Amino acid sequence: MISTTNDSSFQVSTDRTRLDVPMIYRFLSEHSTWAIGISLSVVESSIENSLCFGGYIDGRQIAFARVVTDYATIAHLEDVFVIPEFRGHGYAKQLIRMVIEHPSLQGLRRFTVNTTDAHSLFERFGFCIPKRPDTIMERFLPKLYLS
């Protein structure tokens, strides 16, 4: 799937062969707030086992998102980022819109995302604080990649 967004210079693709894995790894392991220290092998495995979206300008990847899903009932949006020099142009909004509109992600009962600082971005697309947070549990190991 390749799709041009409102900004005709920004394209979103789910073609894994186009992904700039070294750039994705570098961003996640060195600059993200959620995956500092992650190994290249873990990033490669996460890409292999997810529906991935690359955002491109003139063939250069400048954005990324991936979805972990069973394609039937549930999906979780992960690793959403736009590299710093391209922020502030609406590319994250365009990327998330393409994720939400992807044909394989329609009719899901639950679509989740975790965020510490982008609530207003995700709220534009119908994400909200869980209606029943008391029913959600997690095993969270935030420093796992630093071990």
Image: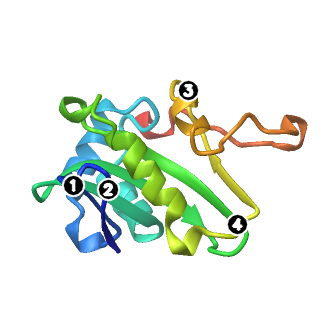
Mark 1 or 4, nearer chain start:
1
Label 4 vs label 2, nearer the camera: 2
Q: In this view, does 8 lie to the left or right of 32?
A: left
Q: Is residue 58 left or right of residue 16?
A: left
The image shows residue 32, relative to residue 105, as above or below, that is above
Question: What's the amino acid at mark 4?
Answer: Leu
List the residue tagged with mark 3.
Answer: 116
Disc 4 element:
loop
User: CA separation, marks 1 and 4?
Assistant: 29 Å
Measured as percent of width and height from the top left, residue 17 is found at 23, 73
In contact (CB < 8 Å): disc 3 and disc 1: no
Q: Residue at position x 55%, y 75% from top?
A: 104
User: CA separation, marks 2 and 3?
Assistant: 26 Å
Badge number at residue 5 = 2
Label 3 vs label 1, nearer the camera: 1
Q: In which quarter of the image is the N terminus?
A: bottom left
Question: What's the amino acid at mark 2?
Answer: Thr
Q: Residue at position x 40%, y 70% from top?
A: 48
The answer to which quarter of the image holds residue 146 is top left
Question: What's the amino acid at mark 3?
Answer: Thr
List the residue tagged with mark 1.
Answer: 8
Badge number at residue 108 = 4
Nearest the viewer among 28 and 11 is 11
Measured as percent of width and height from the top left, residue 132 is found at 88, 39
The answer to which quarter of the image holds residue 141 is top right
User: CA separation, marks 2 and 1?
Assistant: 6 Å
Label 1 vs label 4, nearer the camera: 1
Q: Residue at position x 40%, y 63% from top?
A: 52
In contact (CB < 8 Å): disc 2 and disc 1: yes
Q: How crowded is mark 4: few (under 14 residues within 10 Å), some or many (20 or more)?
A: some
